[in-house]
Each structure stands twice: as C-alpha cells, then as structure tokens.
Amino acid sequence: MRTKTLKKNKINVVTLGCSKNVYDSEVLMGQLKANNKEVVHEEEGNVVVINTCGFIANAKEESVNTILEYVQKKDQGIVDKVFVTGCLSERYKPDLQKEIPDVDQYFGTTELPGLLKALGADYKHELIGERLTTTPKNYAYLKIAEGCDRPCSFCAIPIMRGKHKSTPIEELVTEAGKLAADGVKELVLIAQDLTYYGLDLYKERKLADLLRELVKVEGIEWIRLHYAFPTGFPMEVLEVMRQEPKICNYIDIPLQHIADPILKSMRRGTTKAKTTKLLKEFRAAVPEMAIRTTLIVGYPGETQEDFETLRDWVKEMRFERLGCFTYSHEENTHAYNLEDDVPEEVKMDRANEIMEIQSQISWELNQQKIGQEFKVVIDRKEGPYFVGRTEFDSPDVDNEVLIDASKFYLKTGEYTTVKIYEAEDFDLYGEVI
C-alpha cells in the first residue's frame, strides 16, 4: 500500500530541451526559493516538476519517457506529486491529460503563476532577474525575448511559444547586474530570434543598443550571441562586436539549408546568394569571428541535387562550428502538408556525410591553432583534465580546451592564457602560460 512521505516537500525541477528551457526552469526555481520552498535541480525530491521539450520527435519521446518514469515513481510511492510544464505540455496538453492521467497537473509555457500556485507559492512580480542558476557559476543564459514571428515551415516554436516578445533593455541590464553580482562572468544571449529584438517594443531592431548597455555591466567579461536569423540581420551588431572586447567574436546563426528550392519551401525569406553574401560580410567585418550554424537534411522534396548543393556549400564556407539534424515531420506546421518523402536511412546518410565533412574542416582549423595562445575560461574539472573554452566556443556544443590537471591548478570560472600544443577534431590540448 502506498504511503505519503512525512518529510517537508522538496521540489525537484527536471529540465529537458534547449537553453530557453534551462532559463525558464531557473526562473521557476528563483520564484520557489523566494517563497521559502526547498527546491533542487535534477536531484531527489518528493514533488517533481518536469519542464518538457516538444520541438522534434526525439525530444518529444524523451519528454514522454521522463513523464512516464516519474509517474511510475509516484505509483511506487517514491514521489508524491508530478507536475508537467514546458513546450510539450503547451502543444499536447489534451492528449497528455488523456494518455497520462496520473500527472497531477499540466501547465503550458505561459502558465508560471498557475504552476506556482499548484506548488503552494505566489508569483512575485518584483523578482526581475532573480533566478537560481543551474549552469556552472561562471556563465549564465540571458533570455532577451520570447516567442517568434518567423513563418518557417518546419518549426512548431510559434505554436508553443507564441509571438515574439522582447524584454525591455533596462530589465535585461538589471538581470545581468544581478548575475554578475553572483559571480557570473559570461552571458549567453538567447532567444528564438536575437535579430528581431526590439521591433515590438521600440519599432526598430535594438540588439546593437542592448549590447552597448550590457558591456557596461561590471564583472561581465564575455557576451555571446546565440540564435540569430539571417534575414534582416542588423549589421551594426558587427560594428559593436568589433569595437567591444567583451562581445565574443562568435555568432550562432542557424541557416537550415542553402539550396534555393528548399529555402523557398522552408519559407526562410532568403536565397543561397543572399546568405553567402551575408556570411562574407560577417567575415570581412570581423575576420576572427567563429560562425556556428545548424542544418536540416531530408526536408520534404529534398533531391540528391539539393543535398549536393548543400554539401558542396559546406565545403566551400568552412564553418568553424556546425551541427546537422534530420528533418522531423511535425503536425500543425506548414511543412506537415508536404509528403515526408525522404527515407529515414537517406536522411541519416546525408546527416552523417555533412558531419564527416565538418569533422575534417574542424580538424584542419584546429591544427592552425597549435602554437597559438588564447584566453580560456575554465568550466569544470573532468577526470585528469581541467576543461575550458575560448571565446570562439559556446558551452556544451563547441570545442573544449583540455589542460593537464596534474601540472596546473585552476579554478572554475577562472580566465587564464593557454598555449595550444595539440589539436583533434573537436578538442584542443593546452598549457597554461
């Protein structure tokens, strides 16, 4: 027979999906802490909140499996309550309520006050910038906008996150100041689309203005840009990047494809010629810039010719960082009306071919770094190494610098100068200068 635990409620927040979800979990945890609730992140607790991802098939499967895992723990008496929030819940709430009824309550992406109420807490409006960060202490995500107004055919984010909504500059500066006071030295700016920032609030693109204010925050050493959209990119951002040493020479600009027929069907609002021109302007304005992109292969109607156009272009552009994903056929998106006609094994073969090319490019670019010195931030100690990153590398997704821990003593969050003596596809080995 199942028995309720007698201990005081400890709320365990489990985060799945992207950095935007990490940020949302941190805001939730900050609110709970302000309500004097005991809250942990992905540790044991008798009340569980699962912040789900509903973006593509693999992420949805992971979210559903995690929900089922904690519902089973509830049946076994290991946990008392299970709440589900986030994108999967926003997108499929009626289906989830029907299929997994043992969850205590489901909440969408905009229902934080309701979730807090269910957890016995009040939503505190005055807590601008108050978060319980879950990343290593030296960096944190700063979400500058929510939602997306772009009409991309393959993407369900507008369904789950709604229309683009920028956070005012002064609120973001306040939040950055609080993070810096807590020891954060690197801000990773995130949004569904950074380049759209400010259009709704100020009637013009204001990313460059925001950056000029954030560099004034004392204690912040690096500011990194994630998820820029290629159409309508505000070129003055490059000028700020060139002028301000705190802005990392790095940009994450998901391009998705390059063959014109696919770009048109994807509703990306650009062409191969325009995209290539934009990237050449990036390189001319900031020659040292590391460009990260992501690509989708196997989109409906992608011919062998379309794929070869993409493959050859990847070879030509020599991106510093690149990820490749197979197309996921998502209901309620514009592309769902198209036939998902590229076989799964062809999708996988194409993705693998792109990543093999990128692996070789990355190896060649890394060889050029041997003998060079870089400013490196230490993220953690792992096995016999301290693991760090240069300004050209974002946490979790990019190259890492490995430093022999038996020879050097370093602290997490410390910035140090490192000379590279060896390089692999995605790892650099260095010695502290």
Image (cartoon, helix red, strand yellow):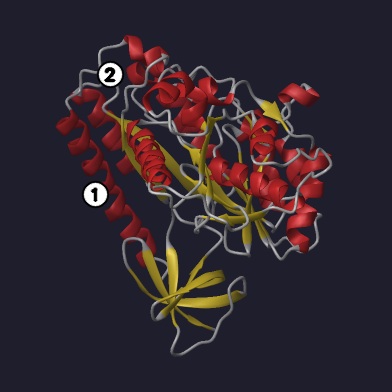
Mark 2 to mark 1 CA distance (whole Å) = 23 Å
Most foreground residue, 124 or 205 = 124
- Residue type pointed to by label 1: Glu
Nearest the camera: 139 or 233? 139
Q: Which quarter of the figure has residue 284? A: top right
Instruction: Give the residue at x 43% y 49%.
Output: 77
**Given the current orientation, which residue lies at the most extreme top position?**
337
- Asked if residue 284 lies left or right of residue 240, the reply is left
Return the residue at label 2: 300
Residue at position x 51%, y 50% from top?
Answer: 4
Is 59 situated above or below 343?
A: below
Say which quarter of the image contains residue 324: top left
Q: Mark 2 or mark 1, which has the lower sequence index?
A: 2
Which residue is depicted at the point 15% across and 33% down? 345
Q: Which residue is disc 1 drawn over?
A: 356
Q: Nearer the viewer, residue 423 or 99?
A: 99
The reply to whether residue 376 is visible in this rendering is: yes
- Whole-percent x and y of residue 80? 51, 46
Residue 252 pos. (x, y %): 51, 43
Secondary structure beneath label 2: loop
What amino acid type is highlighted by mark number 2?
A: Pro
Image height check: is 383 above or below 427? below
- The picture places residue 241, in percent across and down from the top left corner, at 66, 49
Q: Quadrant of the C terminus?
A: bottom right
